[in-house]
Image (cartoon, rainbow, N blue to C red):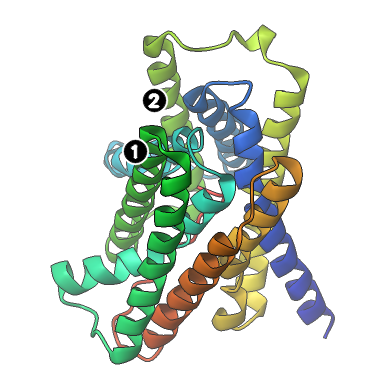
Amino acid sequence: MASKKKAYLALSVTSIVWGTTWVASKMGIAHLPAFELASIRQFMGGTIYVVFFLIMGEKFPTKSQFAWLIPMAFLMFVSSNGIATYGLQFITSGLAALIAALYPLSVVLIERYYFKAIKITPQTLLGLFLGLLGILFIFYKDSLQMHGTHYLLGVGLSLFAMITWSVGSIIISRNKISMNAYYSIGWQMLISAFTMGMITLFSGKYIPINEIPANTWGILAYMVLGGSVLAFVSFIYSMKNLKPAIASLYAYINPIVAIWVGSLLLNEKMSLNSIIGTISTLIGVYLVNNSLKNQKDPVEAIADADGM
C-alpha cells in the first residue's frame, strides 16, 4: 500500500515537473541562445548519469556502441531537444508541449506504413483524426491572429522535433543495444551537448559562461535536477509500481501543466480555442494508445524524459 502511494506521488512529480520544463525552457531562451541552453543542460545532465554509472562499475563504451550512440544522440537530443528548444522562440510553451505529446500518433503512422506492424482500427482512425484536428484547430485560429511566418516556423520545428523523437523511439524499440539504457542516455546527452555547443560557437550567437545571468543558471539547475534526474527517477518508479495505463497518464497531463503554468508565469493566453483544441488532441492520443493495447506488435515508444 505504501509503495502504491509512493508510485502515485512519483507519477505526480513526473507529470508536473516534465510539464513545467517546457515553461522553464521558454524562460531560459529569453536570456540565452536556444542551442547554448540545450547544450549546457544536456552536458550537466549527461555528466550526472555518466559519472554515476562509471562509479557503479560500468565500462567505457566500445567503438560499436559509440557507432550506435552518436546517431541516436542526434535523433533523440540534438534534433528532438535542441530543435524543439529553438522552436520555442516562436510559439507558446503549451503548444510546444502539446505537439510533443503527438508522438504516439507519429509512431503509429510510421509503424503502419513503413513496417506494416500495426493494424489500424476504427478507434485508431478516430484517435488520429481528433489528435490532428485539435492541433489544426489551435494552429488555424492562432495563425490568423499572429500573422507571421515565425509562428509557422515554430510549429514546423516542433513537429520536426516530435517526428525525429518518434523515429528514434522506433529504432530503440527494434534494435536493442548491449548497454544499460540509462547509461546510454547519459552518453547521448554528452554527445549532443558537444554537438550543440559546436553549433552555438559556429553561429557566433552565444553568451560567455561567466556572463550567463544567475536566474538562467537557476532555470538550468531546475531543468537538470528536476527534469533530467528527479522526474526521470520518478517516472521509472511509477512504471514499475503502477499499471502502464495509469503510469502513462503523465503524457496527457504534461501539456495541461505547461499551458496552465505558461499562462501564469509567461502570460501566454489560454483562449477557448486552445482549450478545445487541447482536449481534442489529448483525447485523440488516448484513443490511439488505447487501440494498440491488445495488438501483438505495439511499439514501446519511450517518453520525453526531460520535456524534449
In the image, what residue occupies the spot 75% across and 42% down? 265
Expressed as whole percent of the image width and height from the top left, the position of residue 223 reads 66, 40
Mark 2 vs 1: CB contact within 8 A: yes
The numbered mark at residue 104 is: none
Q: Identify the secondary structure beneath mark 2.
A: helix
Q: Which of 7 and 291 is in front in this view?
A: 291
Q: Distance between the residues labelled 2 and 1?
A: 8 Å
Residue 247 visible in the snapshot: yes
Check the image and report above or below for 122 versus 13: below
Name the residue that disc number 2 marks: 195
Question: Looking at numbered disc 2 in the image, what kind of residue is underneath it?
Answer: Thr
Q: Identify the secondary structure beneath mark 1.
A: helix
Expressed as whole percent of the image width and height from the top left, the position of residue 165 reads 37, 52
In the image, what residue occupies the spot 60% across and 46% down? 22
Q: Is residue 251 left or right of residue 67?
A: right
The numbered mark at residue 74 is: 1
